[in-house]
Amino acid sequence: MSSTTMDTHATVRERHGQKDGGYAPIPFRTVLGVELRKAFDTRSGFWLLVAVAAAGVIATGATLAFASDSDLTYNNFAAAIGVPMTILLPVVAILAVTSEWSQRAGLTTFTLVPHRGRVIRAKLVATLLIGVSSMALALAVGALGNIIGTGLKGVDTTWDLSFTTILYIVGADLIGMMIGFTLGVLMRNSPGAIVTYFSYWFVLPTLTGLLAANQHWFEKAQPWVDFSYNQNRMYDGGFSSQDWAQLALTGTVWLLLPLAFGLWRVLRAEVK
Amino acid sequence: MIIVDSLTKKYGGFTAVDHVTFRAEPGRVTGFLGPNGAGKSTTMRIVVGLTPASSGTATVLGRRYADLPNPGREIGVLLDASAQHAGRTGREILTLAQRTMRVPRSRIDEMLDLVSLSDEEAGRRVRDYSLGMRQRLGIATALIGDPEALVLDEPANGLDPAGIRWMRDLLRGFADRGGTVFLSSHLLHEIEVIADDLIVIGSGRIVASGTKGELLASAGTYAAAAELAALANALTTAGHTAEMSLCGLRTDADAGQVGRLALAAGVPLTELRPADSAGLEEMFLELTKDDAREGDAA
Ligand SMILES: Nc1ncnc2c1ncn2[C@@H]1O[C@H](COP(=O)(O)OP(=O)(O)OP(=O)(O)O)[C@@H](O)[C@H]1O
Ligand SMILES: [Mg+2]
């Protein structure tokens, strides 16, 4: 409001006269940087990521405290840490998308970057980066727990988690995040997408499990139609080429097609 | 410069914006005036690419908005000051804009200073902001990229009298330095003190547009006399309009004509002047009467 700031404004404005043919386009890394920052800069986002980290530490502590000596293996540490992560990371993905609509922040976001596809792509990359780094952190915390735990109890340190198995787990968790992202894009509403995700994760497998147990035909068909069944199988690893085919088929139908449809709508919808 | 050409927006069978054409010139403040639901916000959203138009075009500084490489540097936009993530602080919201536009970090403090948000206030979450503070933050976000044009939807909403005065001076200064200002309001009083040009919209259609001077002139002349009925009679016999109010009347005759007619009729005038804002207000209500919710109340 002071005259000095008004003057600054005037001098900056004068540079407009010198500029030739406009400004440089906003690079993708800038959009990505801003989207990464947005994952941390709200209370909900910040505490969610703190919860992801805290869950890892608590799970390690619990394994240390309650597991029998023979259960102090890297596999068990990783599994204990992986479970909360599998549940929480997709919520990070959901909020990255839905907050633009639920909180209406998109009014600013999409006017500053008037290409929604770029913003959504940046959100996807940011989400997956957060996912991969959280999992790397979890595996490191688990390894530390394994070393400390076995050292304390004086048993041999067991590294019974192969690199391939780790890749399966990371892949399954990333698929979980993609599901969250897709629900966010489809519903553009935080509570709705979160509730749907939790139903998908907790309720659906129980129902399909019941169905498979009682209906022989479904048990046979399940790998070909049930995406969550295939996703859950990834945590055990060791996929055959038929398993991969089933994952790809169900993933296309239940994940990629809905995502494509959601993106198609987001690019056309009004932002208000 | 903002050029809108035959812009139309249909929602199903309902036409919210109907072949709207106008331009907002650099160096001038262009006011976009209309009652609730007239289509102001919809038009503005189309201009900045948030809502797709059914037909027609809108260009900003010679390009479609989506073709601007870094829109925040060229056009500052404030559509709804409350549309922010409530969990972010004011400073954080400015930081996100500053980073997206790639302007120096020092702009954040400059803008906070410009809109009179203190350091402590900037550190508060937007959830805890008053409407006026949100509006100030929105103005800061619009200005941080040092743009050449501004698009503001009801920027005075929620500001106190001092704030409105400040906003007026700010926008005046912006236009005087060559900037284009396009702002909406449904309050005539608010907009007539700041705007150079006026576009009046009702039911999605432009019902009047021109410089404020032109519109004021078309608002006619205000005259008062003790024998008001006689004056009105003289005016209407001469083929002019005469709308009586409590102690005077408004007519489409100019001051000279009113004077001559009053003299001829032997009616002493107690007041004679351009009808200006009162007249403009009546005109505004009249122009948009068919669309206003109150129906005949106007
Ligand atoms: N998605 C939509 N579907 C149907 N009608 C809509 C939609 N969006 C806006 N409208 C209608 O379009 C018209 C114009 O709305 P708009 O928000 O542009 O008005 P406005 O001039 O900004 O009014 P106000 O002064 O109240 O802000 C209104 O009748 C509104 O109900
Ligand atoms: Mg509006």
Image (cartoon, grey):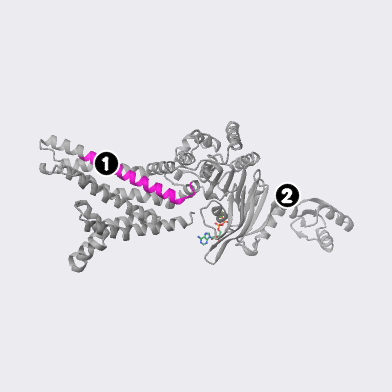
Q: Which amino acid lies under the numbered mark 1 shown in the image of this protein?
A: Ala
- Residue A137 on the magenta segment: yes
Name the foreground residue: A199 vs B219.
A199
Front disc: 2 or 1: 1
Q: Is A157 on the left-hand or right-hand side of A26?
A: left
Q: Is A160 on the left-hand or right-hand side of B4?
A: left
* Badge 2: chain ID: B
- Residue at 21% x, 55% y is A233
Which circle marks residue A136 in the picture?
1
- Residue at 21% x, 46% y is A164
Quadrant of the image for the N terminus of chain A? top right
Find ligand 1 in the image and state its quadrant. bottom right
Which circle marks residue A215 in the picture?
none
Pointer 1 local density, CA inside 10 Å: few below 14, some 14–19, many at least 20: few
Residue range (magenta): A113-142
Q: Is mark 1 within 8 Å of ligand 1?
A: no
By secondary structure, the bulk of the magenta-drawn segment is best described as helix
Q: What residue is disc 2 on?
A: B213
Tag 2 secondary structure: helix
Name the foreground residue: A11 vs B219.
A11
Task: Confirm whether residue B95 shows in the render.
Answer: yes
Task: Confirm whether residue B187 shows in the render.
Answer: no
Q: Which amino acid lies under the numbered mark 2 shown in the image of this protein?
A: Gly
Tag 1 secondary structure: helix
Whole-percent x, y for residue A207 in the image: 24, 62
Name the foreground residue: A253 vs B89.
A253
Q: Are marks 2 and 1 on the same chain?
A: no
- Residue A258 on the magenta segment: no
The answer to which quarter of the image holds residue B92 is top left
Residue B149 versus residue A230 in the image, above or below: above
